Image: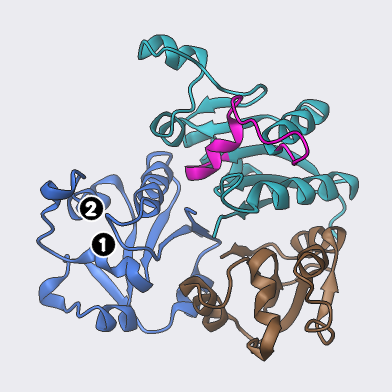
Amino acid sequence: MSTLIVIDQAPYGFWTGREALDMAFSLAAFDQPAAMLFTGAGVNWLRKGQRPDGVGQKSAEKNLSAAPLFGIEALIADEHACQQYGLTESTMLPGVELVSNIRDVLGDHKHVVFAG
Amino acid sequence: MPNSLTFTLVITGAPWTSQAPQTALTFATAALSAGHSIDRVFLYGDGVHLASSLSTPPSDEAHWPQQWSVFLKKHDIPATACIASALRRGLIDKTEQARYELPAENLLAPFEIAGLGEWVEGSQAADRTIYFHGN
Amino acid sequence: MTSNSTLHILNKAPEHPRYQACINALAPSDTLVLIENGVLSAAGNQLHAPCTLYALKADIDARALEAACENLNTIDYDELVQLTATHPKIISW
């Protein structure tokens, strides 16, 4: 039974997502199973081709692409939110599992955690 | 009915930005009087501002850092501010002051600074982990 | 008695995106507790939760919502602690 870390805020304009990612990486570092769910504006984390030089931040896309290496078990995205923000398979990071029913995903995990 | 459970409390909402520190403190007090125990309090994100020894609200207003400090000492509850969240936001203990050669330290006792490992450990060990977020 | 249902603790006002996300995630067997700004949803009949529902009295009183919350089950902090003790799975929204 793993922990689901939920990101529902957009990258760059909010810091919470980065702190959520740190939580997921920490779980993995301590060999605790962790998965991440992107929903609402949080799905914008998943867009390919982010170039944040002009806003003085590290690339959320690059940070997130390290997730499988760190041992994050799954990156899951809310299909409806992806549609809302115009994200398609071709504009999205590879390896993201799309789900239509968030309730099922929440039910699959022992702990469900927002970073803030 | 489970009689006595252990709780880890995680506070991510800052004082004077959100209600989280007050809600968490009232909850913690009620949990102890119901016979439960609180294993650990973990401050994360903006929640680390609760551990500032420099917060100085007007004297006729509630002082959340002080109230928490008194509560933690009285019940001997370990409390940790996440080091990454704390350093970014200017919450510094003596060790970090020395390490980064900073002009001051401002961590309110008995809060300590440590990594997310404390949260991982706390939430795995406790019967319940309750999060208190901002808005 | 330990429940298999999820306890949802919601502190967001209705216009917050996470408010609706929480409402959408509720299963009929779940329990929802409104705290802090979450109790504002009781004002003006905006609240449609498909499960057992409670609201925290201190937050209702603070916001002068006693009349609006007339038909809600209000609880104090002792009862909130009790709900967290009987629900192994808790989501704070």
x, y (%) of residue A63? 23, 48
Mark 2: amino acid: Ala
Mark 1: amino acid: Trp
Question: Between A67 and C65, which is closer to the camera in this rendering?
Answer: C65
Q: Residues within 10 Å of mark 2 (few under 14, many from 20)?
A: many
* Chain A, colour shown: blue
How are the colours assigned in the image? by chain
Question: Between B111 and B50, which is closer to the camera in this rendering?
Answer: B50
Task: Specify the segment rendered in magenta.
Answer: B43-63
Task: Say left or right for B80 vs C87.
Answer: left
Task: Say left or right for C52 vs C18.
Answer: right
Q: Which chain is cyan?
A: B
Mark 1 secondary-structure assignment: helix
Residue C5 appears in the rendering: no
Mark 2 secondary-structure assignment: helix
Distance from label 1 to label 2 (Cα)? 6 Å
Q: Quadrant of the N terminus of chain B?
A: bottom right
> Which residue does the image show at 68% across and 29% down from the upper left?
B78
x, y (%) of residue B106? 54, 21
Disc nearer the start of the sequence (1/2): 1
Residue B97's label in the rendered image is: none
Task: Have a look at marks 1 and 2 and say if they share a chain.
Answer: yes
Q: Does residue B4 sit above or below C30 in this rendering?
A: above
Q: Which chain is brown?
A: C
Disc 1 and disc 2 in contact, CB within 8 angstroms: yes
Q: Main secondary structure of the magenta part?
A: loop
x, y (%) of residue A60? 23, 52
Residue indicated by mark 1: A45
Q: Quadrant of the C terminus of chain B?
A: bottom right
> Which chain letter goes with mark 1?
A
Residue indicated by mark 2: A60
